[in-house]
Amino acid sequence: MKTLLLGDRFITNDILRAALERRFEGSGIVFEYSSHQLQWPVAPMESNDEVSEFSGSDDEIIPFLKDVEIVLTHTGCFTRKAIDSAPSLKAIALGRGGPVNVNAGVCSERNIPVIYAPGRNSNAVAEFTAGMIMAQSRSIPQSHHCLRHEHRWRGDLYASEMAGTELSDSVVGLVGFGAIGRKVAKIMKHGFGSRVVVSDPYVTDDVRAEYSDYTFTDLDSLLSVSDFVSLHAKATKETTGMIGGREIGLMKRSAILVNTARPQLVDYAALYSALRDGRLRGAALDVFENEPPLESSMLYSLENVTATSHLGGASLQAAEIGASRAADGLYTFIAEGKMPEFVFNKDLKG
């Protein structure tokens, strides 16, 4: 089968190919490869009116699609124009949690399944979140920066008014309780001894009973009692701007807001103003309203922020898991003639 490996500099073509060959070993199915490497994450992702969070472009990708039957990718841009240029295309498999970079509606018109890999980076993001909480709470990046780059010893960070709080004596509030939220809860509760409070309107009674060690409550109550508020909700119309000026006003002045989820969840203008004015102790941010942030962003003038360049999911294991789950879906579709479990357009016939 003619297969295009459209990797990037995180999930590389070597990783994609190894996952595919490992899964199809012994199947008798032979792949004829072509490949092209995209430049994300060195080059930022892009979005347009049709697809989002993609790398590459129609002009870059279309020359590789003419006779292709299968595409295995991560961030490749698949617009209507790109899909229409691939008359032999039978399946697109993505090593990521959602098919936002593919026009799935056009694929449905063509009876092309769009396979994806949910939860591939849940461990990576959960561990990263715990690191962000500790880093901002204990002034780790601030001390590091001053010592390494300014040759300045920050003894003042040991002073009572600057010292951090121990996680074993803190309330960690989790907004969203999906795969990542649940893993963060486990790390904080069983790793550090934190009290965990959860807000998620979609949690069922069965889940509440299963996780009886945690307190489930509404968002306003969570904000008012938490020392750390960590966001793990999906970006939807319902959750867009869910943390704004009113919500920040409910938080403790000593609290820290952590966002390793989606920038749409937060009103960043309100957050930056609260951080500047001392209304919040600090924030730890891995996602931003613009990526990279604009040079004019207030972010750059704030000292009480730990900021990273959307690194939460960046682990070698996450890349390999994403590729393997995409390959698993292709095996189900090609070798077994069935619809994979994780396919966006489930109504297609296998």
Image (tube, grey):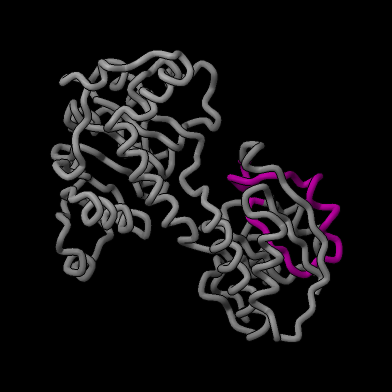
Type of secondary structure dominating the magenta stretch: loop
Image spot of residue 262 (x, y percent) = 43, 42
166 relative to 236, above or below: above
Front residue of 156/111: it is: 156
Residue at point 15% right, 21% down?
A: 160
Image spot of residue 209 (x, y percent) = 16, 68
On screen, residue 328 versus residue 245, left or right, reads: right
Front residue of 248/195: it is: 195
Q: Quadrant of the C terminus?
A: bottom right
Residue at point 59% right, 74% down?
A: 328
Count of numbered circles in the view: 0
50 relative to 343, above or below: above
Residue 272 can be seen in this image:
yes
Residue at point 64% right, 74% down?
A: 330
Residue at point 36% right, 42% down?
A: 131
Locate residue 138: give its quadrant.
top left
Is residue 69 found inside the magenta-colored segment of the image?
Answer: yes
Image spot of residue 43 (x, y percent) = 66, 37
On screen, residue 38 versus residue 206, left or right, reads: right
Is residue 71 found inside the magenta-colored segment of the image?
Answer: yes
Q: Quadrant of the N terminus?
A: bottom right
On screen, residue 66 versus residue 123, left or right, reads: right
Front residue of 267/176: it is: 176
Locate residue 316: give its quadrant.
bottom right
Image spot of residue 54 (x, y percent) = 63, 46
Residue 236 can be seen in this image:
no
The region drawn magenta spans 46-75
